[in-house]
Amino acid sequence: IDSPENLVTDRVTENTLSVSWDPVEADIDRYVVSYTSVDGETKQFPVRKDQSSTVLTGLNPGVEYKVYVWAEKGDRESKKADTKAPTDIDSPKNLVTDQVTENTLSVSWDPVQANIDRYIVSYTSADGETREVPVSKEKSSTVLTGLRPGMEYKVHVWAQKGTQESRKANTKAPTETREVPVSKEKSSTVLTGLRPGVEYKIDVWAQKGAQDSRKANTKAPTENTATISWDPVQADIDRYMVRYTSADGETREIPVRKEKSSTVLTGLRPGVEYTVHVWAQKGARESKKAKTKAPTEIDSPKNLVTNRVTENTATISWDPVRATIDRYMVRYTSADGETKEIPVSKDQSSTVLTGLKPGMEYTIHVWAQKGAQESKKADTKAITGTEVQLQRGQQRFELQDLEQGVTYPISLVAFKGDRRSRSISTTLSTVDARFPHPSDCSQVQQNTNAASGLYTIYLNGDASRPMQVYCDMDTDGGGWIVFQRRNTGQLDFFKRWRSYVEGFGDPMKEFWLGMISENQEGLDKLHNLTTGTPTRYEVRADLQTANESAYAVYDFFQVASSKERYKLSVGKYRGTAGDALTYHNGWKFTTFDRDNDIALSNCALTHHGGWWYKNCHLANPNGKYGETKHSEGVNWEPWKGHEFSIPYVELKIRPFGYSRDRFSGRKKRKPKEAIERWIKTPLII
């Protein structure tokens, strides 16, 4: 068979490219097109024999593909024609401006997917002056400086790789006008710092009382919240706006009702100082901004434990704090009131307490310090070694109420009057937890935890990455991490993108993998739990009405990264509720303010939820609770259709194929199991 000739590519976009070729002369059955990316991923599909072009879709931005085309007849193939074609770099998305002052403004954008060299930011004033600044490819924000007050700027951002450039994202932003207060006794003033040959518009007005939202202040800060209050304005306004920015530049903005003069900032990071601005809005008009600082408290050390306790020493350890600190402080107080305090380096998370008294209970406190700031104190207790006097003929003693996974040194000495023998010693260890840092609820369960409830797990078993989750230890053998629950309708799930990324709700009630972890966010938790680990996870949906229940299990579950908009992957279905999730397989997460579905409208907006919508859904567990309008409620279409809102839904994951019965053959021991020590050779005293 002759080979296709003149293979060319054109009409290239970020994720598609068109290929065409001269048709062969031979009578054939089909053409076959194969394309391979630089990282080795290959796809192949047939093309009808009467066609000589096709469009490759689903490509990655900024990637070079090698394309092959050949003809087939039966089991015979022609030689392959080939060519190379790079896709376009994708454009930065969601370009926004904030933190605007008289002469600066901050711009931020969603990073591109392509591998690039840099971003370029261009900003042009209304009178035509243009500047360009390069921005590192790792960054997705920058601050434009040297701007002029009261001037509108057009801002463009695009990505570069070699000579390739993405399409430009653009937005507009006016800088604030400059205001000069003048004493009430004066009726003239001099404006300085003006530019030659420029026309200025000047407004003069009188003020009495507070016209701006001034005197903002901070009170009652915690590790991750702060209350901001301000003096209300006298003018008739639509709302207040509150913007808070961390020391490293992360910014959030929230509206506050005009009747209120305070709000609580949530989701803050421990030990970080935030700059807070408050201003009033009416229509397109804004007041000047009031400013205050809000430093959060240092977070407290967690999981303080004692081990390797002897007669006069004890080793203690804890999970390090997230905040930047100067040191840890350890205080230990004996039952008779003697107290000692020692500093510990900020890089350490354990220390040995020395000079303790035998048989004494100590109360131990650990906290973090940064300058004059101190975290809350973590506390625990430790009992040093105890001396026990045995009877002359006694050759056996039972040690009880010991700690799990602890090694105890034991010494034996004989006395007669004021004379004593040499001491003989040994060490005994109690059974340790099978998983000291369980990576999921199945390992928590194997550590002899049988009750459902809140537990701390550690991503990939890493002690520095704790996460508090709700474990279902009852359903189908247990070991499930629950990441969503609907059962009362008291919590509104019609949330913006940021809320789903961060998580919300109470894990003991209704929630979406809520704000219960120290350093992970909602959808990021699902990504980190299911990706980058050798463990394969399955997902289960439990559905209930007043009289019925059903379930659906999929033998694979994975959530991609934020860069891929948390794309969903699920495996094969089994269960009684019907297969609703396969329809959503391969789709990105959508909320009413971040549309990633393929419908003409925004599915999250029309179906009152946040989900891996396609066009639009067969499953809508985050829909409007109790809503019976078509496809707007809490739906699982194969079970109850689109017009029945399911009153109880739980979504959960665990390792594929896990069963509590697989591990029940291993002899279990109680955490405080007694140890018996038999003395084989009698002592003759």
Image: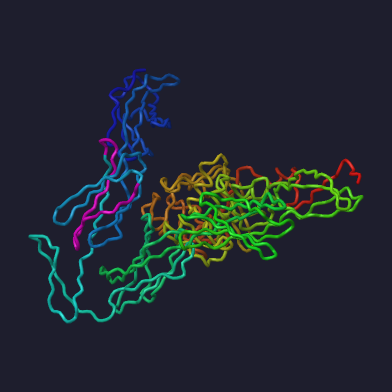
The colour scheme applied to this rendered structure is rainbow
Q: Quick one: 657 or 571, which is closer to the camera? A: 657
Q: In the image, is 210 to the left or to the right of 589?
A: left
Q: Which residue sits at x=42%, y=30%?
A: 40
Percent from the top left, x then y, of residue 90? 32, 43
Picture layout, residue 667 above or below residue 356: above
Percent across and percent down for residue 604 are: 42, 57
Q: Residue furthest left?
A: 197
Question: Can residue 476 be spotted in the picture?
Answer: no
User: Does 150 appear in magenta?
Assistant: yes
Is residue 113 left or right of 365 when viewed as pictured? left
- Coordinates of residue 421 in the picture (x, y in percent): 84, 46
| x then y, percent, for residue 557 | 54, 45
For the magenta stretch, what is the residue range? 139-164
Residue 259 lies in magenta, yes or no? no
In this view of the protein, can residue 528 be seen by the observer?
A: yes
Who is closer to the viewer here, 219 or 505? 219
